Structures are given as C-alpha cells and as structure tokens.
Image (tube, coloured by chain):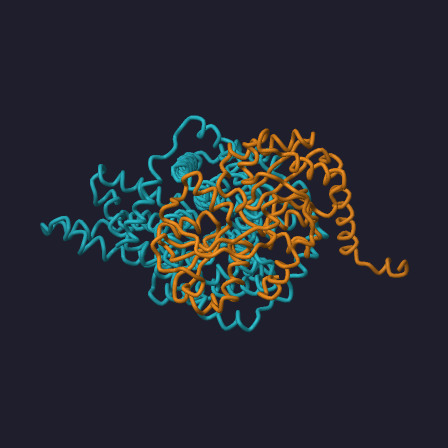
Chain colours: A cyan, B orange
C-alpha cells in the first residue's frame, strides 16, 4: 500500500508536461538527429535487404545459411550491437545509425525472404520456363509482392523510429540521451514532454506510411533526405585494426564457474519476464481491443481507445522500463510491466483487427436469433477470432523473449542484465558467452512457437508481425 | 617475406589494401579535424544537468579556454565512453575511478585533472531518517541499492566496505543497481530500498538544490577516502593540448566561474596522477572487477 502511494506520488510529478516554447525549440535538434539516424539506417537496410530477401526467397544456394545468420544478428540486443559499433566507428551518431542499419537489414531481409518464399509458384515457373535469368525472375517477383513489401517495410520503419531512441543514445545525442538525462535529473515533466514527442513522431510516421502505400512512387522523394542524413551521420573514423584487435579479444567466449552456476536462474528469470509480460499485455489488450474494434464499439469509444493503444505502442519497452524504474523502482517487475505495456499496445491493435476481420456470416446468423450484442460477441466474434488472437499472442511471446534480454539493460534482471553487466565491466569473453546463450534461447522459442502453431492448425502469418 | 608475397591470395591482398586505405583515410581526417577537441562525460557525472541547454556553458567555457572548438558528448553508458577513448573518437573523457583504471589498463588513458575533492573522495551509505539501520552490520537481511555497476563510490568501494564489515552483499542482503547516484538517493528517500550507497557530491548537491529531502534521509556510514573522478586523455593526445586542458580546469575559480563549477559540482581543480589510484586498483582486483 505504502509503495503504491509512493508510486502515485512519483507519477504525479510527471505532470504537467513541460511544453514551454524554449524547451520544445531546444528539442528540434535531438528530434532531427533521431529521425535522421533512422532514415539513414533504413536506407541502407532496404537497399541491402531487398536483394538479400530475393535471394533467400528464390532459395539460392546457401540461402538456408543466410537465413541462419540473419536470425543470429536479430538475436543480438540492439543496444549491445550499438556498443560494438562504437568500437568500430567511435562515439557519435554513426555508431547508433550503423547498429540500426545492421539490425534492420537482418530483420527486413528475413521478412522479405519469407514474403518472397510465399509467392505464388505458378507464374514464377512460367517465367522460368521462358528461360529468364534469375535476375529477371527476381525483378518479376517484386511487383508480385509489392503491397506486402510496402506494408512490412513501413512497419519496420516505424519500429526503427522507436528503437532509435535507445540505440541512438549510445553515442550521445538524439531523443534518447535527452530522455535518460531528464530521468537521471528528476526532470520528470520534461520526460513526459519527450514521451509525447515520441508518440507524435510515431503517429506522424504512421500517417505518412499509409499515404505512401497508396502512392509508392513518392517514396523516391524520401531518398535524397535519407542520403543527406547518411552523409551527415557518416562515421568520423573507421578503426579497423583497433576493432579487429578488440573483437579478437572477445574470443573464445568463456564463463567462470560462478556464472555458470547462476545461468539456470537467469534464463528462468528472462523466460518469466517474457511470459508474464505477454500475459499482462494480453489481459490489458483484450478489453481495450473489444472497445476499439469498429465492428463492435461505437466510434466515439473506438477512436479514443485506439489512440490510447497507439500511444502505449509508440513507447518502446526499454523506455517504459526506464520510466517505470523511476516510478516503481528497479527489478524484474519493472521489466515485466514494461513488456506488458508495450505489448498491450501492439496486441490491442492486432486483437481489434482480428475482431474486425472475422467472417461476418456466422456473426449475422447469431445476431439474427435476436441475441443481445454481448451474446453475439461472446458466441460468435470471440470464438471466430480465437485462432488469430492465439497466433498474435505467440508471436508476441517470441518477440518479448528477445525484448526481455534488452530490458535487462535497465537492471530488470535475467540473462540480459548479466550480458549488459559483463559488457559494462569489459568482460567481453563473458559477454559473448551470454550473447550465444541468448541466441540459442531465441532460436529455441522461435522453433517451439512454430511447432505449436503448426500443431494447433493456426495459419502461419506470411511474415513477422508488427511490434 | 618477399618470397611469400606472390602466394598471397587476391582476397587477402584486397584486405591488406583496405587496411592501408582506411589508415590513410583516417590520418587525413585526423588532420582535417585537428582543431576540434572531443570531450566525453560518463553519464553519471552529469546526472543532474544533462538536459540539452544545461551543458552548453561548460562547452563554451572549454572552447574559449582552449581556443579551439570543443564538442561535449555525453554517451548514456560507461562502456561506450571508454571505447570512445580507446579508438580515439574522444580526445578527453570524464571518468570515474574504476572506469579510469579500466581505460588506463586497456588503452593507456592519461590522467589529467580532477577536483580537489576527488583525491579524498567518500562514498556515503544512506538510509531513511527513521530507519533502524545505524551501522553496516544492520544491513543484514535488508534491501540495498548500488548505483551503476561501474561506479566507484556507488558500487566498488561500498561493496568492499560491506565485506570488511563482515557482510557479504551477495548472500546477506538483496541488492540491485539503480544505474545512477541520483536514482539511488531517490530510491532510498522513497523507501523503495532500505539503504543505498552513493557519491557524496551528488548527495550534497541534491540536498542543497531540494531535489532530495534532507529530513527524510540519514547518512549512517562514510567510506574511508579514495581517489575517484578524473578527466583523462587518450594516450596519443599531444602534450600541449593535455597541458591546456589541465590549465583550463585549474584556472576555474568560484568568484569568476561559479556556473561552470556548479555544473562540475566542484570548487577547485588540481592535476591528477595515476599513482593515486593504487588503492582502488587493488580493491578492484581483489573483487574481480578488473
């Protein structure tokens, strides 16, 4: 009870946000820096991942191995990747930008690969039969999947904008450095300002991508500013010899006996965080999704709830974690709630879509019996939506396992915290050992979730989900 | 050697070429950027004034004092700061005692200048005013907050003090890292933990500025003095610049530069030496943190 009162007291100190003109003006620099880093990174990511995705999608020689590498890169917490980039390119925005470029190249290439694999085989075979070269086949494949490429590509961009806050802060600068600064300085009203700015940016990106998907040609307009950002944030140096030496010293990975003895507890803690975070997210998301499904709730309820879900989703797990640590203190609970809040936003939106997309015929049939609206939802909409809801939740669990290692950086515990501490203390051999363990865990859960989905007969979504 | 060269694969030759090209590019850039001094601060150091506007006076002062453009960078973590010094993307960095020792061991960082108080620094053990904790022994079974894992006054020294007092932090109490001194003070003040350890200058500054409530907090133990924060240079930085930086700090006086000294939470700066860190280095070794 006392701790709740304490938390509420701290929560109040986040209000009202500091919306003074001079602070907002001071923020233009960090905002542009964060957006610029994202734009530059994503330009690289799209350029590299499109051919890579095509190659994997067309099952070129060694594409299984490439897929394996891509999954491996994605299993590295983005923050760890960013600090590794500092070793190569020094302190500065370049480190964050390149880390994001690598991470999202892997993520986008994997998605594009999955998308191209699911392309209809018949027209492809026909094209091949004409004696077309692999490049011609690839060029034929792109328009076939253009819609999916655009939507998943823009989901990834949105995700990168959010990630840039924390990853970009590694080299100093951007919104993230400012956010951490306000939290450390107990300048909570400005923290709220920054959260609002972030929510605003994500909403703007969202609105922009919707328009761009209708007129993909306009995408070309974004290339020059992205190139400019790439040039502005280019590495000031590239210390190859230094980096080779430092990275070389990270091998072979090793853990001392104390650390090995602690491993099972750490792994369990990470799994628990992911599991409870997903459950919490689902519990919050479910009623909110019902309230925001346009086929169920009236618009004056659906619209504000939808906005609220978007706000929850716009703030990445780590940032929720940092805020929660300030409010409620550090620990696995903070990590779990952080995962839960962000998951609630993502799952809420996906659940709502699941409700909206159910086959209307059975719903109308139940309604025709004169059943009250509540009964219609309970006996028709819910059972029909249960399969997609299950799939979304499983995907979210996979994602949260990865994120549970990332929120370890804020001291939430588990294998992520061990990894981060090893890195902070320069015990790089131990860090690499923890990275490998994280990687195995992520791959194992990926496999497990795929098997579960197959056994339950749930359709496999064409590619990864929005986060 | 020359006999072997023809056997080199073209791939390897390309690699060697790339290395040389990179080195050349790097030295060209170094010439172009010579005027600019890049200074990094570990996040904790600026914990209470990291907001965009507030770091501007320090940067302006250093730029004026060094007669060269200065870029102040505040990365959000210790590790990145030291790596920045290691590969030369930072010329100077403000480090804690333990981070300095690591940077010195790993990359030969050169100690330049520090606050007078940093030579005889203290870690404070704090608890709530009304708590039953009055000595380190009382910590048994309690919850405790350390700052950042790389912090000297927020982790290394208090950890060692507890061990000397017969308390094994790993077994006898439940501890966690808050990530910063300010967060530790807040965690203790609000009762989120029973006690914590922090940097004395951060604690005093927070009390003085009203960011922490003096009536709610009590210092129940103070560590023996040790050497802590220091401004250190990357090994390759030329001697003249090193000296100029030392002078820029030692010239600060409370009469003329109050705003700068407030940001640095100090009153007087003195040149620093590596020898001061012998004690902290031994402690770090014995605790396997080095």
Q: Is residue B233 visible?
A: yes
In the image shown, does A109 or A325 lie closer to the viewer? Answer: A325
Q: Is residue A130 visible?
A: no
Task: Decide if residue A27 is on the left or right side of residue A426.
Answer: left
In the image shown, does B185 or A239 lie closer to the viewer? Answer: B185
**Picture quarter containing residue B196?**
bottom left
Q: Residue at x 31, y 40 (%)?
A: A307
**Picture quarter containing residue A310?**
top left
> Residue A182, position in %: x, y?
45, 40
> Residue B23, position in %: x, y?
76, 46
> Residue B40, position in %: x, y?
61, 42
> Residue A50, position in %: x, y?
55, 47
Above or below for A255 versus A156: below
Task: Decide if residue A2 is on the left or right side of residue A199.
Answer: left
Q: Residue at x 40, y 64 (%)?
A: B138
Task: Decide if residue B67 is on the left or right side of residue A420.
Answer: right
């Amino acid at each position: 009870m006392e701790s709740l009162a304490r938390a509420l007291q701290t929560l109040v100190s986040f209000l009202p946000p500091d919306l003074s003109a001079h602070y907002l003006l001071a923020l233009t620099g960090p905002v542009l820096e964060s957006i610029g880093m994202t734009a530059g990174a994503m330009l690289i990511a799209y350029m590299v991942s499109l051919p890579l995705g095509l190659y994997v999608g067309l099952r070129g020689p060694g594409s299984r191995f490439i897929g394996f590498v891509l999954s491996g890169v994605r299993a590295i917490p983005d923050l760890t990747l960013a600090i590794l980039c500092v070793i190569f390119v020094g302190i500065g925005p370049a480190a964050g930008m390149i880390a994001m470029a690598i991470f999202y190249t892997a993520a986008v290439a994997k998605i594009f690969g999955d998308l191209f694999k699911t392309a209809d085989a018949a027209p492809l075979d026909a094209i091949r039969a004409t004696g077309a070269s692999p490049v011609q086949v690839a060029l034929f494949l792109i328009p076939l999947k253009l819609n999916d490429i655009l939507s998943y590509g823009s989901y990834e961009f949105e995700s990168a904008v959010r990630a840039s806050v924390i990853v970009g802060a590694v080299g100093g600068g951007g919104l993230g450095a400012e956010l951490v600064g306000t939290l450390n300085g107990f300048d909570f009203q400005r923290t709220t300002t920054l959260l609002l700015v972030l929510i605003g940016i994500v909403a703007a990106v969202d609105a922009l991508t919707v328009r761009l998907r209708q007129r993909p040609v306009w995408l070309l307009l974004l290339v020059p500013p992205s190139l400019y950002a790439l040039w502005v944030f280019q590495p000031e140096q590239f210390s190859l010899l230094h980096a080779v030496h430092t990275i070389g010293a990270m091998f072979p990975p090793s853990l001392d006996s104390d650390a090995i003895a602690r491993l099972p507890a750490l792994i369990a803690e990470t799994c628990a965080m992911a599991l409870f975070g997903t459950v919490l997210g689902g519990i919050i998301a479910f009623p909110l999704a019902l309230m925001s499904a346009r086929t169920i709730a009236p618009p004056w309820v659906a619209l504000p709830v939808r906005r609220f879900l978007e706000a929850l989703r716009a703030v990445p797990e780590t940032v929720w974690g940092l805020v929660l640590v300030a409010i409620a203190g550090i620990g696995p609970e903070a990590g779990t709630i952080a995962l839960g809040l962000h998951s609630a936003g993502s799952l809420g939106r996906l659940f709502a879509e699941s409700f909206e997309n159910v086959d209307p015929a059975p719903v109308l049939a139940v309604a025709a019996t004169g059943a009250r609206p509540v009964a219609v939802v309970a006996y028709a909409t819910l059972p029909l939506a249960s399969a997609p809801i299950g799939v979304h939740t499983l995907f979210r669990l996979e994602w949260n396992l990865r994120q549970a290692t990332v929120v370890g950086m804020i001291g939430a515990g588990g294998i992520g915290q061990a990894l981060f501490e090893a890195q902070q203390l320069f015990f790089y051999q131990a860090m690499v050992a923890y990275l490998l363990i994280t990687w195995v865990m992520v791959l194992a859960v990926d496999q497990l979730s795929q098997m579960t989905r197959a056994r339950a007969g749930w359709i496999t979504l064409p590619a990864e989900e929005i986060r | 050697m020359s006999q072997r060269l023809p056997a080199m694969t073209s791939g390897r030759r390309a690699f060697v070429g790339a290395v040389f090209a990179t080195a050349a590019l790097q030295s060209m850039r170094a010439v172009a950027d010579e005027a600019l001094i890049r200074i990094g601060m570990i996040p904790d150091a600026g914990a209470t004034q990291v907001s965009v506007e507030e770091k501007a006076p320090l940067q302006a002062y250093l730029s004026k004092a060094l007669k060269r453009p200065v870029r102040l960078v505040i990365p959000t973590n210790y590790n990145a700061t030291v790596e920045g010094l290691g590969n030369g993307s930072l010329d100077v960095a403000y480090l804690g005692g333990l981070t300095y020792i690591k940077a010195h061991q790993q990359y030969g960082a050169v100690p330049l200048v520090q606050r007078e108080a940093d030579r005889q620094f203290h870690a404070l053990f704090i608890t709530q005013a009304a708590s039953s904790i009055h000595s380190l022994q009382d910590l048994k079974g309690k919850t405790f907050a350390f700052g950042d894992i790389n912090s000297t006054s927020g982790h290394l020294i208090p950890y060692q003090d507890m061990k000397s007092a017969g308390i094994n932090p790993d077994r006898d109490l439940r501890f966690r890292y808050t990530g910063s001194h300010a967060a530790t003070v807040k965690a203790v003040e609000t009762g989120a933990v029973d006690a914590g350890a922090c940097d004395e200058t951060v604690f005093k500054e927070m009390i003085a500025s009203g960011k922490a409530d003096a009536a709610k907090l009590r210092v129940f133990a103070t560590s023996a003095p040790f050497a802590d924060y220091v401004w250190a240079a990357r090994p390759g930085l030329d001697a003249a610049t090193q000296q100029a930086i030392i002078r820029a700090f030692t010239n600060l006086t409370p009469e003329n530069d109050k705003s700068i000294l407030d940001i640095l939470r100090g009153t007087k700066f003195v040149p620093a030496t590596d020898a001061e860190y012998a004690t902290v280095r031994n402690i770090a070794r014995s605790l396997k943190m080095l």
